Image (spheres, rainbow, N blue to C red):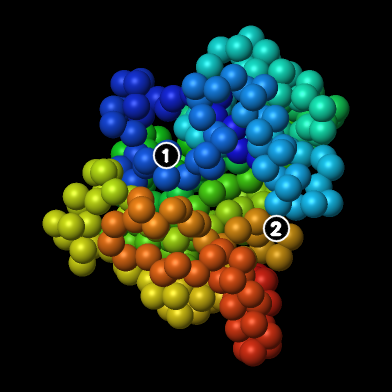
Amino acid sequence: MAVDAGFTCPNRDGTAGTGGCTYCENDAFNPSYCDPKKPLEQQISEGISFHAFRYRRATEFLVYLQPYSNTYAPLEKLKRLYEEALSRPGVIGLVIGTRPDCIDERKLEYLSDLSKQVYLQVEYGIESHNDDTLLRINRGYTDALARAVVRQSHEYGIRTGGHYIFGLPGESQEQMLSAAGIISGLPFDSVKFHQLQIIKDTRMEVEFRDDPGAFHQFTLESYIDFIIRFIEKLNPAIVIERFTGEVPPRFIEGHNLGLVRHDEVLRMIESELEKRNTWQGRLYA
């Protein structure tokens, strides 16, 4: 269950930049109970109620610290926050969403110790391994840093996830496909893949309106074809947690896969894999 603990990012507060990532509007991604104005305890209680109703057999829960950069604070503050979340009944672990430039050795040492007691995963928003793309979308760090942090987290024994976006401006489909080899060579436990969605009131909305030709625009059919070709090259030991992202239609501006839910896209991908008699890692060397 997602919670918003009120963090920010270094590319918003001036440390690494201002304005945040050009595609980012966190209100589009947060469920209704996920509100930083509510105490963490209340968000967790409401989240448990929501998911316990939706998934009737659910009795244990992971708290997903999702919006912004959830390691971007002094270590003592992080300890208080994480341990408060873990103290709630039914909570058995944490998934911590953050950026590669918001971690250091002291935090990794603490997270490594914590991971020996509860389920814990750190999910890094990598988005792209292309430095030109990272600069264009105002990420505020380099690909070299991202790769180094993923390896370092693994060395500390921490479950490590990566988040990627397909369709960022300036990237061709072949450039996106080439990322499969890079990801396969990194010690990820899991990855999430999302198609780019143009969100209203973002700088990327303006960029898309001014130069739509800079964006590789997937249709539903072409995205499924792309995903299959991508995962054929992907290390089969890496768990894929998600293939698509979705936000409420009122936030969407410009091209998207339509109103098909992510679980339906998953079924389409599975069906196409069977039709082609292929699988994750078939072309992995």
Nearest the eye: 203 or 38: 38
Residue type, label 1 = Asp
For residue 27, the mark is 1
Residue type, label 2 = Val
Q: Is residue 14 visible?
A: yes
Seen in the picture, residue 44 relative to 210 is either above or below; the reply is above
- Looking at the rendered image, the disc whose residue lies closer to the viewer, 1 or 2, is 1
* Residue at mark 1 to residue at mark 2: CA–CA distance: 27 Å
In the image, farthest residue toward the left: 210
Give the residue displayed 56% in from the left and 71% down from the top: 265
- Quarter where residue 243 is shown: bottom right
- Label 1: few (<14), some or many (≥20) within 10 Å? some
Q: Say left or right for 102 vs 111.
A: left
Q: Are marks 1 and 2 in contact (CB under 8 Å)?
A: no
Q: Is residue 175 visible?
A: no
Nearest the eye: 150 or 99: 99
For residue 40, the mark is none
- Label 2: few (<14), some or many (≥20) within 10 Å? some
For residue 239, the mark is 2
Nearest the eye: 20 or 27: 27
- Quarter where residue 13 is shown: top left
Task: Measuring from the top left, give residue 158's x and y in whole percent.
Answer: 73, 35
Task: Measuring from the top left, give residue 82's x and y in whole percent.
Answer: 69, 22
Task: Measuring from the top left, give residue 164's x and y in whole percent.
Answer: 50, 53
Seen in the picture, residue 136 relative to 107 is either above or below; the reply is below
Helix, strand or loop at disc 2? strand
In what quadrant of the picture does the N terminus appear? top right
Q: Say left or right for 127 vs 92.
A: left
Give the residue displayed 64% in from the left and 89% down from the top: 275
Give the residue displayed 36% in from the left and 53% down from the top: 250
Seen in the picture, residue 270 relative to 214 is either above or below; the reply is below
